[in-house]
Image (cartoon, rainbow, N blue to C red):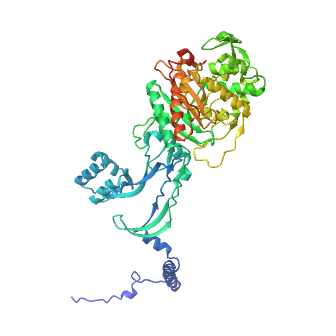
Amino acid sequence: MSRVRKAVTFNHNPLLQLSLSQWRARLVLVVLLAGMATLLGRSLYLQGVHNEFLQAKGESRYARVLEVPATRGRIADRNGNLLAVSTPVSSIWALPSDASRLEPGQLRQLAQLLEMNVTELNNRIANGRDFVFLKRQVSPELADKVAKLDLPGIYQQSEFRRYYPSGEVMAHMLGFTNVEDRGQEGVELAFERLLAGQPGTRRVIKDRRGQVVEDVQSIRAPRDGEDVALAMDARIQYLAYSALREAVQQHHAKAGSVVVIDVRTGEVLALVNAPAFNPNNRAHLSGEQLRNRVFTDTFEPGSVMKPFIAAMAIESGKFRASTVIDTYSGSFNIGNNTIHDTHPYRTLTVAEIIRKSSNIGTARMALAFGPEHMWALYDRLGFGSPPGLGFPGEASGNLRPAKTWKPIEQATMSYGHGISVSLIQIARAYLAFARDGDLVPLSLTRVDAPPVGVQVFSPRVAREVRQIMETVVSPGGTGVRAQITGYRVAGKTGTANKIENGHYVNKYVSSFVGLAPVSDPRLIVAVMIDEPSADQHFGGTVAAPVFAQVAEGALRALGVTPSVPLAPLQLTAMGVERGLDGEGM
């Protein structure tokens, strides 16, 4: 049988034949050409016209913009002594993605240098973040040791750390900064805008390991912070700190404060609190230590308010220093309430009321005037309003509206109960006596031009009350322990019960506010001791000696010429008894 072969023509096989309309072929060609033209145009645009995009993408692989920190301004006292400076330090940080490749031996070396345990170091590196600080603000020497290890993923950056040469002595005045070198308390916070400056930026090239290999460009130069010259005098500050610390320890007190003001300018020359803290080492600090009690704590001032009532009475013309007032032998009824004096006196002159610190005499003077009259005086003196120094936490105290006062409340407020003030407020108010009735604003920084004040009392009345307050520190007054060698001083003691849960308790605030020299006042020194508990609590025995120690040293430091030859006090020879040290409360 013969086999017949048939030839198959594939061109005529309908299954294998592909037919395409002519218009569709042209459309595909146009689309392809348009795509090519678009790509070519985009390429020309990016590489020739708008090439910043590609350059930026390329630079992002090796170029970085780094912040250049600004140096924080220095803080100095009025004589140029540096109180706060910023020192260069380094911070150690890691890129966890790279640092995870560290070998166990390398981890141990790094942990030892950073004073961390290996587990803690591992936890920080393995936290999943893109960036993590391992230790902030290390010394340059330690940073060099870390750098020599040449560990993958471990880097450094330059920072600044604040250093306070005077430590505890200046702590509450200066405050401190945080790890970012930003003010957190005190002058550091109050003057943050001046001190902080403005950081700059620079463009650098980094290698694969993140190390800077070339400094390309300075984008913005850093603007360093401004220096601040404070009004305070480091010598007087140290005197106040030493005297206060000794008094708090001697009387087993809870706390204490001292503030020293220049009468001529209103400058704050010293400001100290106890307990204090070391701003260079704040690892174990509590709120009690950090609180600047001069500004933030208010208390019932007690008898230190009495000279203001005497001045108000004399200024009105209704009373004179020699006016005799019946003090009812130490017990005086106001409605259903009774006020008492520590020592019973039948009659006292206005001057003797201040010298002996009579509650009844002071209350009777106050009640001769309407509540609005007395409130207006306290308001002009600055009570009930913040001091306005810009210091963080300034307290305004408590001065209720006059229309709410009852007669017994007006009476008690005249001798410092039922009203609360801060120590800085009471110290400033005493400027009215030291400056012949003129009250000026206070300043934490140096004052070059004489300040403009407000006349609260007439010069005659201010000088007369100043002379009355001088008798307070004379034999027979409540503040004899405030006397100092070579200078005439004047002031007023204060002792007030504290309030707990709405009731007065047997805890006291002892105070003394005074000025010196009397003939030409230069300084106001205000002292507050909180809860003295060593069998003594009167302001004349607890606070007045602190005033004497601080005022004498400060006057000599300022070169104030002694005004009188006065032998050192011999209290026993002067016949000062415990009863003469007590104030009416």
Q: Nearer the viewer, residue 412 or 454?
A: 454
Q: How many marks?
A: 0
Can residue 291 be seen in this snapshot? Answer: no
Quadrant of the rendering where the N terminus is positioned: bottom left
The residue positioned 52% from the left and 60% from the top of the image is 223
Q: Position of residue 493 (x, y in %)?
A: 58, 24
Q: Is residue 147 left or right of residue 17?
A: left
Q: Quadrant of residue 144?
A: bottom left
In this rendering, would 566 be left or right of 314?
left
Q: Measured from the top left, where is residue 12 in percent x and y?
A: 40, 87
Report the residue that reaches farthest toward the front.
565
From this view, report whether residue 246 is shown above or below residue 388: above
Residue 239 visible within the image = yes
* Above or below, comparing residue 230 to residue 27 in the picture: above
Q: Residue at x 61, y 30 (%)?
A: 421
- Asked if residue 465 is positioned above or below residue 221 in the image, the reply reads above
Comparing 419 with 450, the one in front is 450
* Residue at 55% over, 35% down: 259
Q: Quadrant of the C terminus?
A: top right
Q: Which residue appears farthest toward the right when viewing the image?
A: 317
Q: Position of residue 211 (x, y in %)?
A: 35, 64
Task: Kindly give the residue lying farthest to the left in the view shown.
Answer: 1
Residue appearing at x 50%, y 53% in the figure: 73
* Coordinates of residue 329 in the picture (x, y in percent): 66, 9
